[in-house]
Amino acid sequence: MDRSIIKQLERIVGADHLFTAPEELRCYSYDATGQVFLPEAVVLPGSAQEIAAILALANAHRFPVVPRGAGSGMTGGSLPVRGGLVLGTGRLNRILEIDPANMIAVVEPGVVTGDLQAALKKFNLMYPPDPASLKFCTIGGNAAECAGGPSAVKYGVTKDYVLGLEIVLATGEILQTGVRTEKGVVGYDLTRLFVGSEGTLGIFTRLILRLLPLPERKASYLLTFSSLAEATGHVSRLLAAGIPPCTMEYMDRTAISVVRERIPLKLPEETAALLLLELDGSEREVALQQARLLDYLTRERIAYRQAASEAEAQEIWQARRAISPATFALKPHKISEDVVVPRARIPELVNFTEDLARELALTILTFGHAGDGNIHVNIMLDRSIKEEEARGEAARQRLFIFVVGLGGTLSGEHGIGITKSRFLPLELSPTALTVMRSIKKLFDPNQILNPGKIFPEPG
Ligand SMILES: Cc1cc2nc3c(=O)[nH]c(=O)nc-3n(C[C@H](O)[C@H](O)[C@H](O)COP(=O)(O)OP(=O)(O)OC[C@H]3O[C@@H](n4cnc5c(N)ncnc54)[C@H](O)[C@@H]3O)c2cc1C
């Protein structure tokens, strides 16, 4: 990017919102993968029109533009791997509308997910997707990755709540998709195409979100098991018993060990795995679900604790959310995967990862969204030991092959980015890849939007 382009960018966003100093570029050079790629410049535009002007400029001069929310992505999606411009959405952070009568919200992409949820509580409403990063990640980043969280087992993921989008295309045109209504089938569903597109097809500047009434009551339970296979074996049976939890998470022994002191309830010494369950609904619904759950737990002789208060329940969920960062107490680096398998096959997956850890002498911990089969597999590493890194990479490859063989998928919520792109052919047929590449070419003929992401490099 030469001086004249920088000058033109400055004219579009104003000097206060353009950064080129190395220490400023550094702040926009990393994400949760820990990888670092320096951009040549960073802009923080204040409107869709400014973004349109930036993309028109980029398209004319063929420089890469990489959208960035909070940079909390796990797969390198916001990293400027081919240099160019990082476009941060930090200034586009307004909740534009909350419409309780029609149960929708209209927001800008830089709104922090947890801030939206807090604002909605005052209206007795909720926006269900609840990634563990909700205190800092943005709605724009969530839509680009199709983020999910513990509540997905009952409420689904981001794509189930995005009704419509305003998107700036690579050419600088502004596209409106979707509806403000519960239903709508006019033309192709472009909203669904863009949700999960990882910033490669367009930049979201406005999102119309579907809301739900806030449940009247919640009850949280912690179930303890002396083996991981036993814990995961109960997942599909609990659901089949007519207990529809709004969250159903599990932790293996290592995951428990990294957050043990944060869990407010005393765990039996021999605990090898936990299931965390939350029930929600009206007073009546929760009472009915509780009765069914207690009946099941008694019948199956499963030890459990119930959170005695809302504060205690919050502490349990905070401990769950703390697992991912806390794993770095074990090793300085990790390969963090979020594979999904059919629920009934979770025990096979966890047996496989335990065997893999033993065979390759690695620490591999698993935890996550048992209710929907989305398992976080963390392969802990010290990348300065090259031979350990190689064992970790071998474990990842074998994990993916195994997961696809179980009828599963490589990612449930973190996306592909740069970390998984070379494994795409394991899951997608050449025809599927060709169709996807054609869609990319249609929306971004000059490959300026977030290049180097999702698709495997030739060879
Ligand atoms: C501790 C921790 C826990 C996490 N837990 C979860 C979890 O439970 N569930 C889950 O799904 N994820 C989780 N994540 C991953 C991450 O938080 C999500 O992927 C989140 O959606 C990323 O949001 P972000 O604002 O940080 O986006 P970024 O990381 O900045 O960007 C992510 C992608 O979105 C694109 N993008 C950003 N804004 C826009 C926009 N306006 N228009 C178009 N594209 C855009 C970027 O180009 C990039 O490809 C976790 C991460 C951490 C660090």
Image (cartoon, helix red, strand yellow):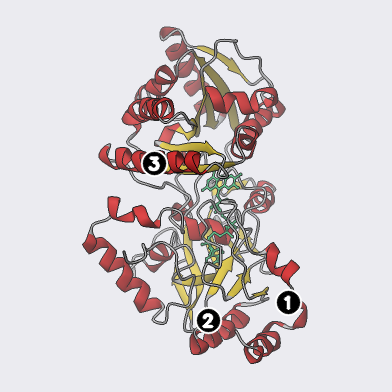
Q: Is residue 81 depicted above or below 368 in this figure?
A: below
Secondary element under disc 1, as helix, strand or loop, is: helix
Asked whether mark 2 and ligand 1 are closer than 8 Å, the reply comes as no
- Local packing at callout 3 (Cα closer than 10 Å; few below 14, some 14-19, many 20+) is few
Residue 360 is situated, as x and y percent measured from the top left of the image, at 42, 31
**Which residue reaches farthest right?**
16
Question: Which structural element holds mark 2?
Answer: loop
Q: Residue at x 71, y 28 (%)?
A: 311
CA gap, disc 1 and disc 2 = 19 Å
From the viewer's perspective, tell me whether residue 373 is left or right of residue 366: left
Q: Position of residue 228 (x, y in %)?
A: 44, 20
Q: Secondary structure at mark 3?
A: helix
The amino acid type, in three-letter code, at marker 2 is: Phe
Q: Nearer the viewer, mark 3 or mark 1?
A: 3
Q: Amino acid at mark 1?
A: His
Q: Which amino acid type corresponds to the residue marked 3 in the rendered image?
A: Ala
Estimate the x, y position of residue 413 in percent, counting from the top left: 46, 48
Can residue 180 be seen by looking at this rendering? Answer: no
Q: Nearer the viewer, residue 283 or 126?
A: 126
Which disc, if any, is residue 63?
Answer: 2
Q: Are marks 2 and 3 in contact (CB under 8 Å)?
A: no
CA gap between label 3 and label 1 equals 43 Å
Q: Earlier in the sequence, mark 2 or mark 3?
A: 2
Q: Which numbered tag is attached to residue 394?
A: 3
Residue at 27% over, 68% down: 435
Which quarter of the image is occupied by the C terminus? bottom left
User: Of 327 and 13, which appears nearest the observer?
Assistant: 327
